[in-house]
Image (spheres, grey):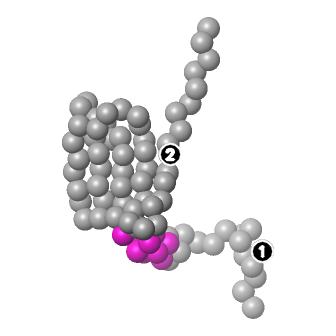
Amino acid sequence: MKKQTKKQAKIHYEPEADVLSWEMSRDPIDFAQESGNVVVHFSRRGAPVLVEILEARKFLTDAQKLVSHHVPPSPLAQHLHPLH
């Protein structure tokens, strides 16, 4: 019986271009679609292969602000960093 290995996504940041890439598959890219600062590359079957986030620093800063406003702090975080 052949052991199955789990596919792991690869994430890469290119600081000079400020692009965050998330490789979801090694399938060949057939086409891409862009929405704002997000480009999704698809295989011939229409499965996502690669996701690129342009202006990644701004995207991640905005995402962090959004999450910090909507996710209550965990009790563990409060314990480690009490508000005084």
> What is the spatial separation of the Cα atoms under label 2 and label 1, in whole angstroms?
31 Å
Residue that mark 1 sits on: 80
Mark 2 and mark 1 lie on one chain; the one further toward the N terminus is: 2
**Up-down relation of residue 81 to residue 35 (above or below):** below
- At x 42% / y 41%, what residue is drawn? 24
| Relative side of 42 to 75, left or right | left
Amino acid type, label 2? Lys
Q: Is residue 56 magenta?
A: yes
Q: Residue furthest bottom?
A: 84
Q: Residue furthest right?
A: 79
The quadrant of the image that shows the N terminus is top right
Q: Residue at x 40, y 74 (%)?
A: 58
Q: Secondary structure of the magenta portion, mostly?
A: helix
Residue 18 position, x and y percent, is 41, 67
Please tell me the numbered disc located at residue 10. 2
Mark 2, secondary structure of its residue? strand
Q: Is residue 66 left or right of residue 68?
A: left
Residue 66 located left or right of residue 79: left
Q: Quadrant of the C terminus?
A: bottom right
Q: Position of residue 2 (x, y in %)?
A: 60, 12
Where 83 falls versus 51 (above or below)? below
Q: Amino acid at mark 1?
A: Leu
Q: Measured from the top left, where is residue 59 in percent x and y?
A: 40, 70
Residue 33 magenta-highlighted: no
Establish if 79 lies above or below 41: below
Q: Residues within 10 Å of mark 2 (few under 14, many from 20)?
A: few
Q: How many marks?
A: 2
The magenta segment: 55-65
Q: Residue 66 is drawn in which quadrant? A: bottom left
